[in-house]
Amino acid sequence: MENTLFQRIQLAIGLERLTDLLRNQAWREGGDISLHPSQRALLAVLASEGESLRPSEIAARLGVSAPSVSDSIRAVEAKGWVERAHDPDDLHRLGHPVFEL
């Protein structure tokens, strides 16, 4: 039984590594609309929420640093996937992603 658990853990680690390799390969071959995996994660968080989020809230949901999220926000904003919301109380709040492929 212990051997089976060890094999399952090894299989899970191997599948995770394979998934990362495939995701990175797809990113490199994606052309002009390609998104870095961290940018995809950012868009997924925004798409799953029914409201705009602060960068610190996004960072907490993704388990990454606020500067990392800020870099991803700038990149997807430059690509036109995210618009900044006009919140008079908080200018750092982000709106929903714009999905136009």
Image: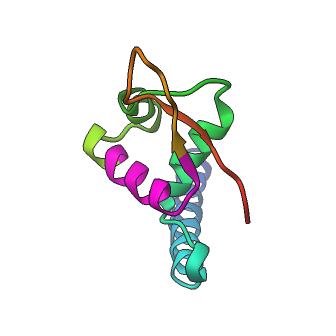
Q: Quadrant of residue 56?
A: top left
| Figure quadrant of residue 75 | bottom left
Residue 36 falls left or right of residue 49: left
Residue found at the far top of this picture: 89
Residue at 66% x, 39% y: name it.
Answer: 47
Question: Which residue is pictured at 31% across the width and 48% down the height?
Answer: 68
In percent of width and height, residue 54 lies at 42, 27
Asked whether residue 71 is drawn in magenta, I would say yes
At 53% across and 66% down in the image, what residue appears? 35
23 relative to 84 in the view: left or right: right
Looking at the image, which residue is at 54% across and 80% down? Answer: 25
**The magenta stretch spans residue 17:** no
Look at the picture and state if 86 lies above or below 42. Answer: above
- From the top left corner, tell me how far across and down residue 21 is, in percent: 52, 74
Query: Which image quarter holds the N terminus?
Result: top right
**In the rendered picture of this protein, how many numbered marks are placed on residues?**
0
- Given residues 21 and 75, the one toward you in this image is 75
Report the predominant secondary structure element of the magenta stretch. Answer: helix
Q: Which residues are magenta?
A: 69-82
Q: Position of residue 91 (x, y in %)?
A: 38, 27
Query: In which quadrant will I find the C terminus?
Result: bottom right
Q: How is the image coloured?
A: rainbow
Q: Quadrant of residue 27?
A: bottom right
Q: Residue 36, relative to residue 53: is it above or below?
A: below
In the rendered structure, the answer to whether residue 89 lies left or right of residue 4 reads left
Q: Compared with residue 1, is residue 15 higher up or lower down, i.e. above or below?
A: below
